Image (cartoon, rainbow, N blue to C red):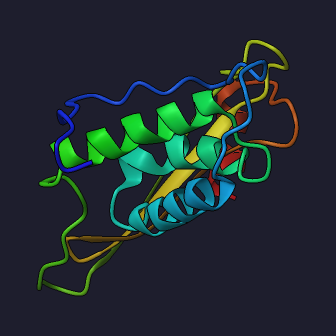
Amino acid sequence: MADYKPASFLLFAKAFPSTSAPFSNPALYQSLVGGLQYLTITRLDLAFAVHQACQYMHSSTQVHFVMVKRLLRFVIGTLQYGLTFSTGAFDLHVFSDADWASCPCDKRSTSGFCIFLGPNLVLWAAKKQPTVAWSSIEAEYRAMA
């Protein structure tokens, strides 16, 4: 893919059409997506797209491989992106947030947090809350808990 044109933005669909032909080399697909999983440690912007690609490891199609190639083109075009680790004070800072009833289907909230050790991001997570919150305050409280 050295001759491919780099992509400056990531275009990745949530759901793939499953009517296309099966990919002829599933081992190649699995190898590429497996390698991209390691890249998500320092490239948080790739996490969603790589997670979507991982869901089709055992039944990949031509469309899935085209999307993985697009993901690789984005990585080539954005090599300067990523988390860097630098020296600094060992102050621990934790931030959390929640958006109340963000999912239009089931009205559940999404909560997330990030932990910084000095200037370095060391842990982050986001997930949909298991139950419906009655208010934004309840959603925020569950995010902190």
Q: Position of residue 79 (x, y in %)?
A: 16, 54
Whether residue 97 is visible to the viewer of this picture, yes or no, is: no
Residue at 12% of width from left, 83% of height from top? 88
Whether residue 49 is visible to the viewer of this picture, yes or no, is: yes
Q: Is residue 135 above or below residue 75?
A: above
Q: Residue furthest top?
A: 104
Observer-nearest residue: 99 or 68?
68
Residue 27 location, quadrant: bottom right
Q: Is residue 99 above or below residue 131?
A: above
Residue 18 location, quadrant: top right
87 left or right, relative to 50: left
Q: Position of residue 71 (x, y in %)?
A: 39, 40
Residue at 56% of width from left, 23% of height from top? 13
Which of the image's four quarters has the C terminus?
A: bottom right
Observer-nearest residue: 135 or 69?
69
Observer-nearest residue: 52 or 61?
61
Residue at 39% of width from left, 53% of height from top? 44
Residue at 88% of width from left, 37% of height from top? 131
Observer-nearest residue: 58 or 10?
58
**Total number of numbered labels?**
0
Q: Position of residue 2 (x, y in %)?
A: 19, 50
